[in-house]
Image (tube, coloured by chain):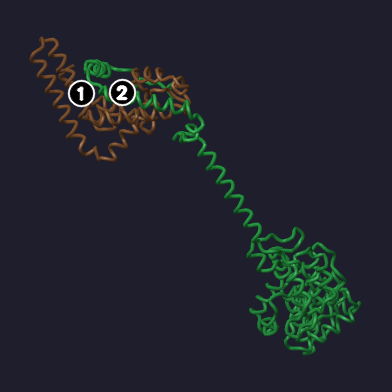
Chain colours: A green, B brown
Amino acid sequence: MSGVHSDEDRPDELTERYRAASAADPAGPSDAVRNSIFAYARTVAADSATHPVATAARRRPAANDYSWRISAAASVVVAGFATLLAWHLHAPTRVPEQKPNASSSQVAAHHPPATAPTVSAERLEPSPVDRQAGTAPAPNSVTTRSRQRANVTAEAPLQAHNEAAYLEPESGGVMNSQAPAEPAAGFVAHSGKPDPSALAAGSKVESRATGAPAAPSAALAPPSAQADTAASARSSNMAPNPALVAAAESGNRELVDQLLRNGISTEQTDARGRTALLIATLRGDTTMARRLLAAGARADAADDSGDTPLAAARRQGPPELARLLESASHP
Amino acid sequence: MLRFAAGDVQAFEQLYRRHELRVWRYLQRNLGNRAISDELMQDVWFSVARAASGYQPSARFTTWLLTLAHNRLVDAWRATRHKERAAAVAGSDALSLVEQLAADSRTEPPERAQSQQHVAAVFAAIEQLPPEQRQAFLLHAEGELTLAEIARVTSTSFETAKSRLRYARSKLRQLLQEYA
């Protein structure tokens, strides 16, 4: 402390003048004070000689003693530990259902189609209680975010289709407006019957989300079975468009290709009996029509009003598409 | 101090005599009252005697001793609100001292009389300093403490102590200009 010296520390002329004046001042404490202090010092010395332990025990800690800092630090540590302990003891217990979803695809495959996606989604996502408690989901569980990511991937083209349907009410707009919000869920919302194509898409999403291989689904079922399912869906006015028809209607060639690779039947029709090829023809999409023809679509498949892709192409073109369909109908 | 802690009373008396005037003058020049200064002087040295058994020489003894004196001084000011009355009391004491020295100067030879007038002027100038500046100056001039030690005794920062001492010197220089 006294090691810090500056110019201000040096006694200047004023300090010397003061010291000279102070030395000239004979004033000082009285003898009574001096004697009193000496007497007290003798008493203290005698007391400490006779009761050394008692004196030491009576001694109060100095104001600059550092022990209080140690005590304060120890108190903080103890309080923190107690808080952690209390938090640990009062934390809500985990719901046992929060286990890894190894069987999520199995659930989707074996449950009734109308309830399978719901059960799967509930099992995949942490319960609201756990979310409120701030508990982290299992490392290999599917969180809400990943689930939403997968759904968005599957929904994107269909959403575009729905928007297009609103713009074209004459091409099945009424049906589209009643389409479920989540086509990837893999079932028909109103009729309660499964839609094979949508179920295939939903199963694909499910397998991508869980990392487990997708279970065999109706998408890989024989075309005849799919046709029956499509017919039953068509019988209901409330049924939404099948995925392939919807994809063709939205002009999403990539999704059409993906669905065709998954074995989706080209015989699927919408509520008015229109196939994907007829819709592609009505849109004048030659490329998509070529892909559908390559996948086995029939150029003479008539809708409820008797219109066929070939007739539509001849009627409204383009000529290239008409030639393509003619060559397909007369191999 | 350590010898007194071991039971040597003579060591305490030597210690007292060595620092007696330093402490008493610090108290008296701040308070301007002999009676209160004697009382606080006694209190300070009682504390020294009591603390001897646990004394650990972590700093200079003078610093520690003047810290005790300064704390007693502040306590006394707080207890009796001496701060407000200090000017009047100190003024009376200072006035009496100045008057006494002036009276003595009339009977003394001219050189000695001039010296006594100068002493009275110095004390009067110190009395006119603000308390904090006066403490800083007295701790420096009377207690021979450094700025860092002054800061420690008065529980202020180094810069504050330095500033107070600078202002005190400036004002004293101004007040004692005619005696320079």
Nearest the viewer among A156 and B36 is B36
| Residue A291, placed above or below residue A230 | above
Res. A102 in view: yes
Of the two numbered discs 2 and 1 in the rendering, the one whose residue sits closer to the viewer: 2
| Residue A93, placed above or below residue A176 | above
A21 horizontally vs A210: left or right: left
Nearest the viewer among A132 and A174 is A132
Q: Are marks 2 and 1 on the same chain?
A: no
| Residue A37, placed above or below residue A97 | above
Amino acid type, callout 1: Phe
Amino acid type, callout 2: Asn
Q: Secondary structure at mark 2?
A: helix
Residue that label 2 marks: A35
Residue that label 1 marks: B123
Q: Secondary structure at mark 1?
A: helix
Q: Are marks 2 and 1 in contact (CB under 8 Å)?
A: no
Q: Quadrant of the C terminus of chain A?
A: bottom right
A227 horizontally vs B60: left or right: right
Q: Residue at x 74, y 67 (%)?
A: A124
Measuring from the top left, give residue A278's x and y in whole percent: 78, 80
Answer few, some or many: residues within 10 Å of disc 1's Cα (few below 14, many 20 plus, some between 14 and 19). some
Q: Residue farthest to the left?
A: B106
Quarter occupied by residue A128: bottom right
Measuring from the top left, give residue B57's x and y in whole percent: 47, 24
Q: Quadrant of the N terminus of chain A?
A: top left
